[in-house]
Amino acid sequence: NAGVTQTPKFQVLKTGQSMTLQCAQDMNHEYMSWYRQDPGMGLRLIHYSVGAGITDQGEVPNGYNVSRSTTEDFPLRLLSAAPSQTSVYFCASSPNPGGNNQPQHFGDGTRLSIL
Amino acid sequence: KNQVEQSPQSLIILEGKNCTLQCNYTVSPFSNLRWYKQDTGRGPVSLTIMTFSENTKSNGRYTATLDADTKQSSLHITASQLSDSASYICVALTGGGNKLTFGTGTQLKVEL
């Protein structure tokens, strides 16, 4: 049981490039989300999904797209990378929308640098 | 505006000692309060989740308390170990939605 798997672990991009951060979970969780973690700030929600085919914006969605074609996968796409998107990105999943009294399970993150 | 504030920002203690981390939250409506441990280079891992009706919850050497009246929570670590060195993040869930508000964390270092 791998939990939440994120790839790649590290990535360096040039400004204007696009890329997709992958996230997969094997716990059959309905709720998945993407966060970014920046120094001195709490995790901020980028996008989330309450089930296959359903996505919605979080607190900081600009510059990012998501899709949810299956329960297991929730990729995050950077459309045109900017230096302000340099961050550590975490994917999380939980059994039901919002998690309520269920904890979110986090992947180990993708460390992204935009030059 | 929903906010979660943690103190201290960082803390150094000797192995075997106890310590207490603080969390003040202002979220409305409040649903539950969570503590996560984040090791360097890893994702956060859940330690405890408490609803407004719970005053205390333990997970091994970790004990969380919650005072819903004063909107304060604490995480007490007993008999610290080197492996406790990590960032501890307080998170409040807003009721009726998916909104999680994260604190910036307390960076704990346990030394010999």
Image (spheres, grey):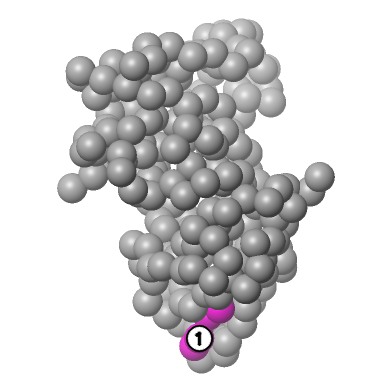
Q: Nearer the viewer, residue A77 or A82?
A: A77
Asked if residue A98 can be seen in this view, the reply is yes
Residue under the point 54% across and 61% down: A51
A84 versus A35 height, above or below: below
Q: Position of residue B4 (x, y in %)?
A: 30, 38
Total marks placed: 1
Asked if residue B10 can be seen in this view, the reply is no
Q: Nearer the viewer, residue A112 or B60?
A: B60
Q: Quadrant of residue B59?
A: top right
Q: Residue furthest bottom?
A: A16
- Three-letter residue code for mark 1: Leu
Quadrant in which the N terminus of chain A appears = top right
Q: Position of residue A4 (x, y in %)?
A: 69, 52
Residue under the point 41% across and 67% down: A56
Residue under the point 42% across and 74% down: A84
Q: Residue furthest right?
A: A1
Callout 1: helix, strand or loop? loop
Q: Position of residue A11 (x, y in %)?
A: 66, 73
Q: Nearer the viewer, residue B87 or B53?
A: B53
- Mostly what secondary structure, the magenta segment? strand
Q: Nearer the viewer, residue B17 or B46?
A: B46
B61 versus A25 height, above or below: above
Q: Is residue A79 magenta?
A: yes
Residue under the point 49% across and 58% down: A50
Q: Chain of mark 1?
A: A
Q: Is residue B62 magenta?
A: no
Q: Quadrant of residue A10?
A: bottom right
- The answer to whether residue B101 is left or right of residue B29 is right
Magenta span covers which residues?
Answer: A76-80
Residue carrying label 1: A79
Q: Position of residue A20 (x, y in %)?
A: 62, 78
